[in-house]
Amino acid sequence: MDVVKEILEKQQKDLEKYKPITVEKHLECRVDVGMMLISDPNDLKEQELKEDRETYLLKLTRDNTQLLINDIWQLPTERVDECIVAKLPPPTTILPRLRKVPGPKPLTKWEKFAKEKGLTKKKKDKKVYDEVLDKWVPTYGFKRSESEKQKKWVLEVPQNADPMTDMFQEKIDLRNEQVAKNEIKRMRNIVRAKKDQVPRSGYFGPEVASSSNFLTAAAVAKSSTASVGKFQEKLRKEKEARGIGVKELIPGAKRKASHISNQPESEANLDLIKSVLNKKPKVDIEKAVSLQKQEDRIERESVVETAGGKTKSKKAGKRKGNRKFAAKKPKGGRGQKAVGKKSFGRKRR
């Protein structure tokens, strides 16, 4: 009897461990298999929630997950690589989205051209057999340059070239120059695609550079020195770049020319001391003479000549440009107007 009792107890524990797949709910849950989402409208049991919160929530989560899995197993299934796969239907729940769904990626210029011409991309082999080296060499990438060096281990020197010329170095220089030209073309294509202007500084090569580009490059090179091009000698038949200044060509803070000049240091210091000690202002002789002439003319016109009880100073005050004897404007009620006195100012309406 004890053995049978132990077997029954063990079976009961196994049944408690593996709960049934059937779940009973007072209200039916809303299941969206396509979104793998389940919504439980039933109320929570407050008594069980207060007694043991974690156990109750774990039990509730297990039951709702079991309902979702039951609906998934009702879908048509198929076996893929020893696995059973179910095809989910389209979702029915609409989730809010901050941004719109991204559209298809636009084709590049080369992809459009290839599509029009019907070109297809052919995959290259990683290695190809070289009959000269009698072995398989990589088509591109790692160790490609080593195979080229082994293949072209000797180069012919032209008859008109210096016999001591390093042809290998010359080949490297030509390759670097071609790479630089390709980089310049790539940058110009980027600027053209963005519909922007090419910068006004730099060297673009003899094939693509214009005379204005050369003038701009020369102006930049001269103004890049510490003296902002003050001591740079001009070339023979050199033209100045019009409309181009140091502030426009060189970005950043405003640069100032160096205080160093061709004048000896002792003379420069003496001039500085004289300018500090000499307190007398500089006299402009021409301006002083003109001011003296103007004062003499005003003094002559202001001489009072009695003729009929009137003075000529009043007539002189009417002359244009003599602001000293111009008629005064009325004070606008702030002062009293003299009775019988004729005003020469602007008539107010």
Image: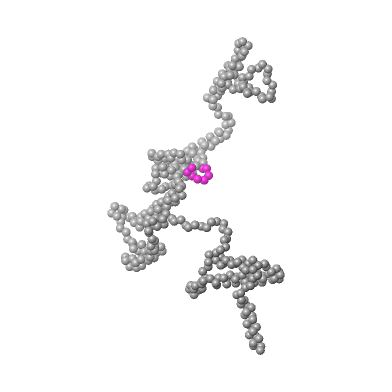
User: In the image, residue 114 lies at what x, y percent?
Assistant: 39, 57
Between residues 248 and 44, which one lies in front from this camera angle?
A: 44
Q: Which residue lies furthest to the front in this view?
A: 27
Residue, far bottom:
1
Q: Farthest residue toward the top?
A: 308
Is 337 situated left or right of 184 in this image?
A: right
Residue 316 screen position, x and y as percent: 58, 17
Colouring of the image: one colour
Residue 250 on the magenta segment: yes
Residue name at image x 61 percent, y 17 percent: 314
Residue 239 visible, this orientation? yes
Instruction: Point out residue 284 in the picture as x, y percentages from the top left corner.
Output: 54, 27
Residue 100 lies, with reference to residue 255, above or below; the image says below
Side of 329 relative to 287 (left or right): right
Residue drawn at (57%, 60%) of the image? 95
Hey, which quadrant is residue 56 in on the image? bottom right
Residue drawn 37% across the image and 47% down it? 207
The magenta segment? 248-255
